Amino acid sequence: MNRLAALAIFTSASAVSFSGVSYADSLTMNNGPEIEKTLLNYNKPFAVKYLDDYDDNKLESSEGADAETPRTDAGVQHIQSSIDSNKALVEKLESRGVEVKDIVNAEQAADGTIMISVK
């Protein structure tokens, strides 16, 4: 009986711990329209990732775990437009020395935070 009770407790604890993992809306949360919608009213912590030689390397294939998958020029413009519409986010970016015109990508992590890539 003790083993059965321990198994039930373990199973319950596992289910509770995994329930927070599904915070991300879906696998498509970083697709253009989804991330743009998120950026319109995003007001949580974010990280800034500076990309070296973005313009020179955006047409080359990406390799490695930290490789940046570049958006199309239109995709970049849509992301910049969404950020521009969020005045609170623009102010936070400016306080960190980031100009919207230099942003080339934004990706949401599973915990809901945003990584903003800057050239």
Image (tube, helix red, strand yellow):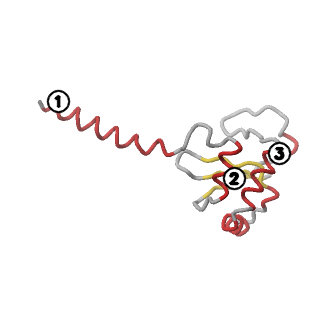
Residue of label 3: 74
**Type of amino acid under label 1:** Arg
User: Which secondary structure, mark 1?
Assistant: helix
Q: Earlier in the sequence, mark 2 or mark 1?
A: 1
Labels in figure, total: 3
Q: Do the numbered discs 1 and 3 sit on residues whose CB atoms are within 8 Å?
A: no
13 and 43: which is toward the camera: 43
Q: Position of residue 26 (x, y in %)?
A: 56, 39
Which numbered disc flags the more N-terminal residue, 2 or 3? 3
* Element on which disc 3 rests: helix
- Eyeballing the image, is 49 above or below 14? below
Given the image, on which type of amino acid does mark 2 rest?
Ile
In the picture, the disc for residue 116 is 2
Residue at mark 1 to residue at mark 3: CA–CA distance? 59 Å
Q: Quadrant of the N terminus?
A: top left
Residue at image position (53%, 44%) is 24
Q: Which residue is mark 1?
A: 3
Residue at image location 83% in from the left, 45% down from the top: 74
For marks 1 and 3 on the same chain, the one whose residue lies earlier in the sequence: 1
Mark 1, Cα crowd under 10 Å, few <14 / some 14-19 / many 20+, is: few
Three-letter amino acid code at disc 3? Answer: Ala
| Viewer-side label of 1, 3 | 3
Answer left or right for 11 relative to 53: left
